[in-house]
Amino acid sequence: MKIADGIYAYIWRGFFENNCNMFYFSEPLNMLIDPGLRHHLDLRFEGMKNDGLDPEDVKHVLNTHSHPDHFEGSLYFQEKGASISMHKDEIDFINTVGEDFFAMLGKKFPTIKFDEILQEGKWKVGDTEFEIYHTPGHSPGSICLYWPEKKTLVSGDLIFKESVGRVDIPGGDGAKLKESIEIIETLDIEILLPGHMGYVSGKKDVIRNFDTIRYYLNMM
């Protein structure tokens, strides 16, 4: 589904298995964010094709974090020659607990070579400049990706529509989650693309969503 010029969202609506939302920034970036579970990629590809996009054009895969429902499908794209990127702290985390964590969820741990090891700060892809924010809380190396030109934030599992990411799993930290949200809240956002649930469009609705999240956090 096209959200804005060059921005596509593939919202996971299945109730039979947990999987993440997938996002795609089209030409000239050809960047896919959080491919999700590998065995559901065919559904995502069907959606892309319906939008006139070719999954074979994917050149870059960005992972907001390493949980299987976001990360597992990256191996497919690596096999197709796409570059794979993730934050350095999340790579350290997955190299420490990844195999056990995947096994706990009944998944086989994919051996992935990271072509780009990300850190917080400006990140240029071709002629497009993004900003990477290290946002621990849901996992140690979670990131949010901000596209200033489009006022668009990909938030991973930091925040959702009227909710926040879990912290009761390995690597979760409630205090860090709150700190990360306080930083992200200061950005000028008109399109919020979270890892689960629906997306939020329009500055007023994004602000309203942060107000709801703040209320929720104060109740924790």
Image (cartoon, rainbow, N blue to C red):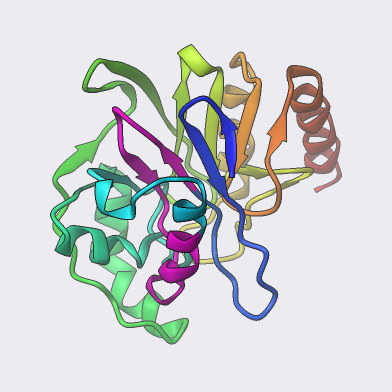
User: Where residue 90 sits in the image (x, y, percent)?
Assistant: 33, 51
Residue 195 is left or right of residue 218, and the answer is left
In the picture shown, does residue 93 fall above or below 142? below
Q: Residue at x 71, y 35 (%)?
A: 200
In the picture shown, does residue 107 fall above or below 164? below
User: Where residue 10 sits in the image (x, y, percent)?
Assistant: 56, 52
User: Of residues 187 and 50, which is closer to you in this image?
Assistant: 50
User: Where residue 75 sits in the image (x, y, percent)?
Assistant: 24, 65
Q: Residue at x 51, y 25 (%)?
A: 5
Q: Residue at x 57, y 23 (%)?
A: 183
Q: In which quarter of the image is residue 132?
A: top left
User: Where residue 117 sits in the image (x, y, percent)?
Assistant: 20, 40
Read off the magenta span: 23-46
Image quarter hosting the N terminus = top right
Residue 212 is left or right of residue 187, and the answer is right
User: Of residues 154 and 95, which is closer to you in this image?
Assistant: 154
Q: Does the magenta stretch include residue 57?
A: no
Q: Does the magenta stretch include residue 36?
A: yes
Q: In which quarter of the image is residue 118?
A: top left
